[in-house]
Image (tube, rainbow, N blue to C red):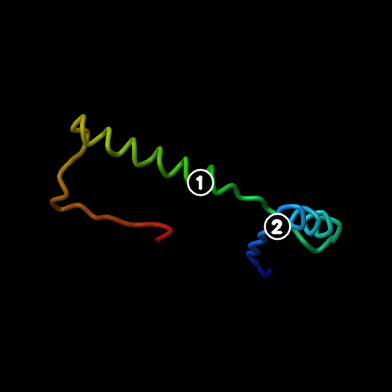
């Protein structure tokens, strides 16, 4: 499987292209809303800041941190 990201600047032409691609049986279209991703990220930051303010955190001493999707 191959994945491509297309940035199309003209919205009406983008709709036409997507409509065409939907007709092809070997193309799967997945729409990802960057607005939703940004809102989710902002919510996570707000929750983290809230935890810090409410002292709902533990010390880092002898802790292990794993970062995913970095």
Q: Residue at x 22, y 36 (%)?
A: 52
Find disc 2 in the rendering and name its residue: 10
**58 versus 23 height, above or below:** above
Q: In the depicted view, which residue is nearer to us: 1 or 30?
A: 30
Q: In the depicted view, which residue is nearer to us: 10 or 7?
A: 10
Q: Nearer the viewer, mark 2 or mark 1?
A: 2
Where residue 14 sits: x, y (%)?
74, 56
Where residue 55 sits: x, y (%)?
18, 33
Labelled disc at residue 59: none
- Say left or right for 8 vs 13: left
Q: CA distance from mark 2 to mark 1?
A: 22 Å
Where residue 29 sits: x, y (%)?
72, 55
| 2 or 1: tag closer to the N-terminus | 2
Q: Quadrant of residue 4?
A: bottom right
Q: Secondary structure at mark 1?
A: helix
Q: Quadrant of residue 43?
A: top left
Q: In the depicted view, which residue is nearer to us: 10 or 36?
A: 10
Q: Residue at x 42, y 44 (%)?
A: 41
**Image quadrant containing the C terminus:** bottom left
Labelled disc at residue 37: 1
Q: Residue at x 68, y 69 (%)?
A: 1
**47 versus 63 height, above or below:** above
In this view, the residue farthest toward the bottom is 2
Callouts 2 and 1 close, C-beta under 8 Å:
no
- Say left or right for 70 vs 20: left
Label 1 neighbourhood size at 10 Å, few (<14), some (14-19), many (20+)? few
Disc tally is 2
- Say left or right for 1 vs 27: left
Q: Secondary structure at mark 2?
A: loop
Q: Residue at x 16, y 49 (%)?
A: 60
Where residue 59 sits: x, y (%)?
15, 44
Label 2 neighbourhood size at 10 Å, few (<14), some (14-19), many (20+)? few
């Amino acid at each position: 499987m191959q994945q491509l990201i297309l940035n199309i600047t003209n919205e009406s032409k983008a709709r036409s292209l997507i409509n065409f691609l939907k007709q092809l049986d070997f193309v799967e279209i997945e729409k990802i809303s960057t607005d939703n991703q940004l809102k989710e990220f902002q919510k996570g930051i707000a929750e983290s800041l809230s935890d810090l303010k409410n002292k709902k955190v533990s010390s880092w001493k002898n802790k292990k941190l794993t970062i995913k999707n970095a």
